[in-house]
Image: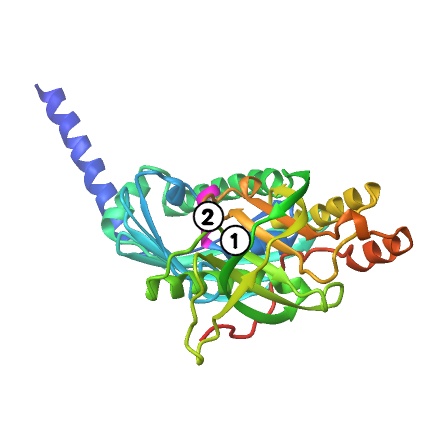
Amino acid sequence: MRILKYILLIVMLITFGMAVFVATSKPTYNITKSIFIKSTPSVVYNYLIDYRNWETFDNTLSNKNNKLDFTEITWGKGSWVSWKGNSNGSMQTISCKENDSIQQKIIVNGESSVVTWFLKDTIGGAKITWKTNGKIDFKSKITSFFRGGIEKVLITDFEQKIVNLDKTLNYEMNSYSIKNIGLVSRVGTFYLKQTLNCKTSSVTKNIKIVLPRLKKYFKSNNISSNGKPFIIYSNQAIGSDNVQISVCIPVKDSIFPSLKSNVKLGKLASYTAMKTKLIGNYSHTKKAWQSGMNYLGKNKILVDPAIEISEVYLKTIEETSYPSKWETDIYIPVLPKKIIKKKYFKRSVDTLAVPAPVPTTQNLPEVLN
């Protein structure tokens, strides 16, 4: 009996000592950790800056028990994601510098912290330095104590994110397929569009701004779409550093927006086109365009310069967070075979066989009211 009392006393002393230790430990933390990753800073930055991508490597956002909510534009300063389920929280970008750093404010179950990601170019990849600081309440002190302390808990979580991110970037960004379908009939349609001029290298970023706003316009005005969104490239600007594009959503009938609106009505007439299908990240669009052009060259089919090239987005980040599953159809208009003349063939193909835009990030103009 006496031995049992001694055991209970020792347990009480240990418990009391642990409680005192936890209670008197610092209520704040400031942690820094660096890891090397086999991707360039620009690739890492472009992936981290968009919260839609976080479902592929962040355990909290990929948890099926958590319901996610996003801002209209999911990337860049001011964008955020929130979740409810196994835990309640939010993450917001408060500042960012292209290919260099991203700073976020994170709130989880009422506890706030600031996280900064620094990216540095190194031989063979990028060095990611992760810094976080915040406050921790008594309950979190207790739970983290049994897991080795708050520093170990947060660093372990960060390291797992980077492992997942590395695997995701290596596979998702490099896995793609291109298939030349051949000549098809591109069905005509009415569509609502937003037209803008931008640098060729920033086309993808502009689309990510304009398309959500165009969809919001449809919703606000109770307009039903009649197919997948697409973009049209102006033939006059193709091949230059600057390009004019129209971001489009098809509609069943002609709809005339307000004269003050930047949204305009367009009509696509039916035509014959070379169809090339890309499954994968948009960084491979250039290869898909060239594949289609090569097909035309081998089969001595002439591009129709009077009709503009278009890309239809069948499956995007809104349908799946995994870039390897994105699906894009490219339509290159062609002339009827009966009017093709061999002496014009090489010139026409060379004129229009230009690289598709490659995703990047730059300062963008405001493109919608």
Q: Say whether disc 2 or disc 1 marks the residue closer to the N-terminus.
A: 1
Residue 116's place in the image compared with 257, above or below, is: above
Q: Residue at x 61, y 60 (%)?
A: 232
Q: Residue at x 63, y 70 (%)?
A: 198
Q: Quadrant of residue 183?
A: top right
Q: Amino acid at mark 1?
A: Leu
Q: Position of residue 195 (x, y in %)?
A: 56, 70
Q: In the image, is 64 to the left or to the right of 23?
A: right
**Residue at mark 1:** 48
Residue 179's place in the image compared with 328, above or below, is: above
Q: Position of residue 342 (x, y in %)?
A: 89, 51
Q: Quadrant of residue 298?
A: top right
Q: Position of residue 335 (x, y in %)?
A: 75, 53
Looking at the rendered image, the quarter that the C terminus falls into is bottom left
Q: Foreground: 298 or 318?
A: 298
Q: Residues within 10 Å of mark 2 (few under 14, many from 20)?
A: many
Q: Residue at x 44, y 80 (%)?
A: 260
Asked which secondary structure carries label 1, the reply is helix
Q: Is residue 127 visible?
A: yes
Span highlighted in magenta in the image? 51-56
Q: Are marks 2 and 1 in contact (CB under 8 Å)?
A: yes
Asked which secondary structure carries label 2, the reply is helix
Q: Amino acid at mark 2?
A: Trp
Q: Residue at x 12, y 22 (%)?
A: 4
Q: Is residue 101 visible?
A: no
Q: Quadrant of residue 205?
A: bottom right
Q: Foreground: 80 or 348?
A: 348
Residue 68's place in the image compared with 347, above or below, is: above
Mark pair 2, 1: CA separation: 7 Å
Q: Indicate whether residue 53 is drawn in magenta.
A: yes
